[in-house]
Image: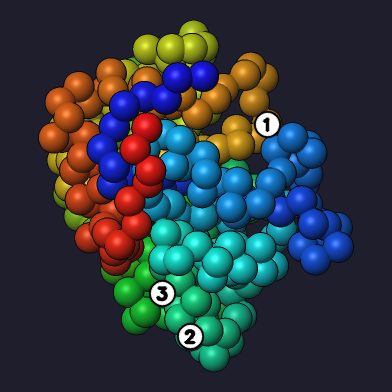
């Protein structure tokens, strides 16, 4: 596999890490799915993958197999020499002391999964208080959503005043086009909230398959609405629950098509993640 040439500073802002040591980091018995063995690894292997593709930093996103057990992510961040930060899954009633511990350990936000939980993370006193505590910490609330989810969730997050990250440019219905109501709700958030969109997971929305050109109009609309300073990129490695194969290089190929100018790509890959997540430029990957 030939890596896509890129800057020596850049961040993959959406991937999942599943540690092979199941004795130390067991999956939750409540998990809806579990990764295959070939989708598991170590933090050092993940960092080597970033190096291979000319990337220096990463944002570890917690996901269903671990539920709210953040130990794999926290230990990976701790051993990364400052290269990794994380997004955690937490229970609404988590204590302020635990939130402070996560903050000190490199967690920069929480993830809410509307595909699994619908509007539950945005209703009830505990959930709304959690949003308020994220705002107080300066954390992001990362929303995994699709189709029309943001129509209902949008007013709640606007009222909460939180910083938002939207997974996979909200996984729109491609057949509805960019004027569909669900995608329009994502574009509306650009005008009224502190919101950043991940240009990630084109295979989550595409109906045509690789090279996923049927999502290009949606990505272009996001870039126009949000600007490059509110867009970041992520691989979605290790590509869980897909019907067809995806790999790291193909995701970077899409980014080059969406943003052909190298200086513009640097803004998405490094300048914006550095500003948002306080990454430092102390690590440079080995020359390719």
Residue with the mark numbered 2: 100
- The residue shown at (71%, 58%) is 66
Mark with earlier residue (2, 1)? 2
Tell me the number on the disc at residue 24.
none
Q: Which residue is mark 1?
A: 241
The percent position of residue 59, horizontal first and vertical second, equals 45, 54
Q: Label 2 vs label 3: CA separation?
A: 11 Å
Q: Disc 3 vs disc 1: Cβ atoms closer than 8 Å?
A: no
Of badges 2 and 3, nearer the viewer stands 2
Residue 24 is left or right of residue 204, and the answer is right
- Residue 57 x %, y %: 39, 52
Regarding mark 1 in the picture, which secondary structure is present there? loop
Q: Crowdedness of circle 3 by 10 Å Cα count: few (<14), some, many (20+)?
A: many
Classify 10 Å Cα crowding around label 2: few (below 14), some (14-19), many (20 and above): few
**Element carrying mark 3:** helix
Disc number for residue 134: 3
């Amino acid at each position: 596999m030939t890596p896509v040439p890129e800057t020596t500073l850049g961040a993959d802002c959406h991937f999942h890490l599943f540690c092979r040591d199941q004795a130390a980091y067991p999956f939750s018995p409540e998990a809806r799915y579990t990764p295959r063995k070939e989708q598991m690894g170590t933090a050092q292997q993940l960092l080597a993958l970033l190096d291979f593709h000319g990337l220096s930093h990463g944002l570890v996103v917690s996901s269903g197999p671990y539920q709210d057990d953040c130990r794999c992510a926290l230990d990976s961040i701790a051993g990364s020499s400052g290269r990794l930060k994380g997004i955690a899954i937490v229970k609404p009633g988590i204590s302020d002391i635990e939130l402070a511990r996560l903050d000190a350990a490199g967690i920069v936000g929480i993830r809410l999964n509307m595909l699994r939980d619908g509007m539950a993370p945005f209703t009830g006193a505990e959930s709304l208080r959690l949003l308020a505590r994220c705002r107080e910490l300066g954390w992001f609330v990362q929303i995994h959503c699709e189709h029309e989810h943001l129509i209902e969730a949008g007013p709640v997050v606007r009222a909460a005043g939180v910083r938002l990250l939207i997974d996979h440019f909200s996984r729109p219905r491609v057949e509805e086009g960019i004027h569909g109501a669900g995608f329009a709700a994502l574009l509306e958030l650009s005008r009224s909230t502190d919101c950043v969109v991940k240009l990630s997971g084109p295979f989550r929305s595409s109906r045509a398959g690789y090279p996923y050109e049927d999502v290009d109009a949606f990505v272009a609309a996001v870039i126009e609405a949000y600007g490059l300073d509110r867009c970041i990129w992520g691989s979605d490695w290790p590509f869980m629950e897909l019907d067809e194969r995806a790999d790291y290089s193909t995701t970077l190929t899409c980014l080059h098509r969406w943003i052909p100018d190298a200086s513009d790509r640097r803004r998405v890959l490094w300048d914006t993640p550095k500003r948002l997540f306080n990454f430092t430029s102390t690590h440079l990957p080995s020359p390719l």
